[in-house]
Amino acid sequence: MSQTIAVPTRVSASASAPRAGVRRTDADRRFYLIAASAMLLFTVVGFRRFFQHGRTTPGDAPVTAQIVALVVAHGIAMFSWVVVFFVQSALVQTGRRKLHMVLGPVAVGLAAVVVILGSMVAALSVHFHAVGYKNLGGAKPFLATMWMQMMVFGAFVALGWFYRRKPAVHRPMMLLGTLVMQSGSISRCPYIGRLTHTAPLYVWNAVLIFGAVLFLLQWALSRTANRAYLIGFAGVVLAALLSAAIGTSAAWAHLTASIVP
């Protein structure tokens, strides 16, 4: 009698493991769609004045006159990246993985455009309008932050592309890359933007808080901690601290003397 009871118990236990894995996978996919939706919302809200009137939100100042076309091109590229990230997350959620993979090279190419334009806009913005970054630690520290964010974004996208066959690594890398680029959007959102005026990390503050919230949300939904995300997020924290140290150094001030008057 005891043997007949043990057999179905073992079968039931073995059958429950795949079901639990499926539930975790579904929860993980929902998480990325939620995260992408939040980032898209932050972008629309943060840059609403730019979309509607071509003006930056802090102080409602106009776009730097000397680089209007470049700023617009950068804005389009950035917004396109956030939209593509949302679309890619939605495609995975709906099971359209083939189309997701077809759009992959397009996303990587767009990321390269974002890095190039973003680096140029950062340098020219502080060159022509250095006073506008007084509340963000100053023009030279701000430039260090922006260039660091561009490098980190590019690195995460490159890692995401390299591990495109491993979703457990690919997804968090793309998420972290998009997270880093959210500093401009979040800093322009009502109330939240106040965090960006706090030394020594300034625009990094909101990014790090948002990143921590995303980790907790993913953990709550899937009941598992994503190791790749944790390692990558630790890298973001390190990059934030490093950019703050570099941006206030004498060597950086000397190096960027020709960029920032």
Image (cartoon, grey):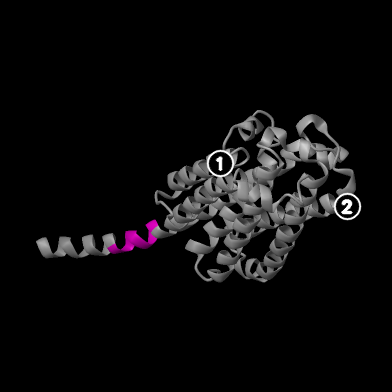
Identify the residue shown where x is 58% and y is 58%: 174
Three-letter amino acid code of the residue under disc 2: Ala
Q: Which mark is residue 257?
A: none
**Spot occupied by residue 214 in the image (x, y as percentages of width and height):** 52, 45
Apparent side of residue 158 relative to residue 140 in the rendered image (left or right):
left
Q: Secondary structure at mark 2?
A: helix
19 inside magenta stretch: yes
**Spot occupied by residue 91 in the image (x, y as percentages of width and height):** 63, 60
Apparent side of residue 248 relative to residue 229 in the rendered image (left or right):
right
The residue closer to the viewer here, 1 or 246, is 246
Apparent side of residue 141 relative to residue 168 in the rendered image (left or right):
right
85 inside magenta stretch: no
Identify the residue shown where x is 66% and y is 39%: 186
Say which quadrant the C terminus sits in.
Answer: top right
The count of marks equals 2
Q: Main secondary structure of the magenta part?
A: helix
The residue closer to the viewer here, 44 or 190, is 190
Q: Which mark is residue 69?
A: 2
Say which quadrant the N terminus sits in.
Answer: bottom left
Magenta part of the chain: 14-20
Q: Which mark is residue 210?
A: 1
* Residue neighbourhood size for the residue with mark 1, other residues' Cα within 10 Å, grouped as few (<14), some (14–19), many (≥20): some
Identify the residue shown where x is 16% and y is 60%: 5
Above or below — where is 259 with respect to 161? above
**Spot occupied by residue 127 in the image (x, y as percentages of width and height):** 79, 47
For marks 2 and 1 on the same chain, the one whose residue lies earlier in the sequence = 2
* Residue neighbourhood size for the residue with mark 2, other residues' Cα within 10 Å, grouped as few (<14), some (14–19), many (≥20): few
**Spot occupied by residue 257 in the image (x, y as percentages of width and height):** 73, 49
Q: Is residue 36 visible?
A: no
The residue closer to the viewer here, 34 or 250, is 250
Quarter of the figure with residue 208: top right
